[in-house]
């Protein structure tokens, strides 16, 4: 019953967060200086063109009416029409997510595989050379900007070694000259550039969480019962240390989905980050508003999934005592 109540509270919090976020996104674009139609068309637009676009966007209606219409359209799956592409905004977003989604997932898999291994390794050798080496490498990873690392990877693997292309995306369809292997190969360097900083962060968090759990009484009890150090580490310590690690992983996944603008532009990938960049450049406020709101909803949903994982990992939450 405690878990059900907690789940219902989290659902209510999710809905409230989305409502507040939608109001903030709408208000941010409403508070732009000047008329929104003028901003989209530029200073050289004629008054007639500005008036026509204002009417098309419903700018002659009260702000609350337009907000209600916008939210209602999103709930009904009827987003706005992009002014620069003349297509539904969600269709454009779905098309670009075919690149950004796999890119973020690949980067996250790299991050988790490297960070968990290094974090546990460093914790198991606390204060020794292995711990110092991992933490030093993590500090270097934190200091590397994604775009600079992306350029270095292009120079090494694309220009010097010529193992992969310098940029672009061939697509997932073999009919277009792409395919699964070609697509994954094109995303390999961007994913590596994104994963480097995230792995450095997650490795440090994993190390700290594991060290804290290793000091608990149940770990000493497990060791006293004859379990090996490795068995205690992977069966007991890591699972109990995963709550703070999952929190960071959820934030990182959200960051990978929403923060790929620079890397996607370096590698000329047709993803969501590049779509947002082009929409801002084209003053396509309709597309910017809908894409930002969709990304906010995706981030909130990821956090909600992390909350569900908490219920599975921490029995105290299931009993409603935490």
Image: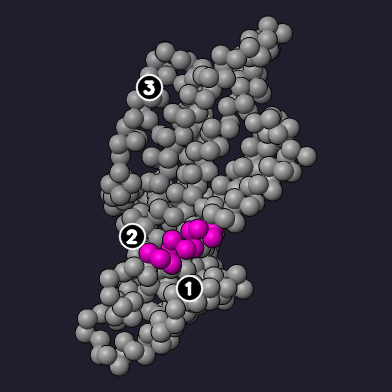
Can residue 127 be seen from the camera position used here? yes
At which x and y percent is residue 159? 28, 52
Measuring 31% from the left and 69% from the top, which residue is drawn there?
32
Measuring 47% from the left and 68% from the top, which residue is drawn there?
290
Q: Nearer the viewer, residue 267 or 36?
A: 36
Residue at image mark 2: 265
What is the residue that sits farthest to the top in this orientation? 224
Residue at image mark 3: 133
Mark 1 closeness class: few <14, some 14–19, many ≥20 residues within 10 Å: few
Magenta region, residue range: 18-28
Name the quadrant containing residue 276: bottom left
At which x and y percent is residue 281? 30, 70
Residue at image mark 1: 64
For marks 2 and 1, the one nearer the N-term is: 1
Residue 212 badge: none
Quadrant occupied by the C terminus: top right
Vertical order, 35 against 140 (above or below):
below
Is residue 296 highlighted in magenta?
no
Q: Nearer the viewer, residue 13 or 197?
A: 13
How far apart in space, not on screen, are marks 2 and 1 (Cα)? 36 Å
Instruction: Look at the image and name its color scheme.
Output: one colour
Quadrant occupied by the N terminus: top right
Is residue 22 highlighted in magenta?
yes
Measuring 25% from the left and 80% from the top, which residue is drawn there?
42
Mark 2 closeness class: few <14, some 14–19, many ≥20 residues within 10 Å: some
Q: Are marks 2 and 3 in contact (CB under 8 Å)?
A: no
How far apart in space, not on screen, are marks 2 and 3 (Cα)? 33 Å
Can residue 156 be seen from the camera position used here? no
Callout 1 secondary element: helix
At which x and y percent is residue 131? 42, 19
């Amino acid at each position: 019953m405690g878990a059900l109540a907690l789940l219902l509270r989290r659902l209510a919090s999710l809905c409230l967060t989305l409502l507040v976020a939608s109001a903030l996104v709408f208000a941010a674009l409403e508070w732009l200086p000047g008329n929104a139609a003028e901003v989209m068309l530029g200073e050289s637009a004629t008054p007639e063109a500005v008036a026509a676009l204002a009417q098309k966007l419903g700018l002659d209606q009260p702000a609350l009416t337009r907000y209600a219409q916008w939210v209602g359209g999103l709930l009904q799956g009827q987003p706005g029409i992009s002014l620069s592409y003349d297509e539904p905004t969600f269709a454009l977003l779905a098309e670009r997510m075919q690149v950004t989604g796999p890119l973020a997932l690949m980067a996250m898999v790299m991050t988790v595989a490297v960070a968990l291994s290094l974090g546990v390794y460093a914790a198991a050798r606390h204060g020794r050379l292995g711990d110092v080496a991992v933490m030093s490498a993590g500090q270097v990873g934190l200091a590397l900007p994604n775009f600079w690392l992306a350029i270095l990877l292009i120079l090494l693997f694309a220009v010097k070694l010529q193992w992969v292309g310098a940029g672009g995306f061939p697509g997932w369809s073999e009919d277009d000259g792409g395919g699964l292997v070609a697509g994954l190969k094109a995303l390999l360097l961007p994913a590596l550039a994104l994963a480097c900083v995230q792995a450095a962060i997650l490795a440090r968090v994993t190390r700290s969480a594991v060290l804290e759990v290793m000091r608990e009484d149940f770990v000493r009890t497990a060791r006293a019962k004859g379990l090996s150090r490795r068995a205690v580490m992977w069966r007991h310590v890591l699972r109990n240390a995963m709550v703070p690690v999952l929190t960071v992983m959820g934030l990182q996944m959200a960051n990978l989905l929403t923060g790929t603008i620079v890397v996607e532009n370096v590698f000329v990938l047709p993803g969501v980050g590049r779509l947002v960049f082009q929409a801002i450049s084209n003053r396509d406020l309709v597309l910017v508003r809908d894409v930002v709101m969709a990304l906010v909803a995706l981030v909130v949903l990821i956090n909600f999934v992390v909350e569900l994982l908490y219920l599975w990992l921490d029995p105290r939450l299931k009993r409603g005592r935490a």
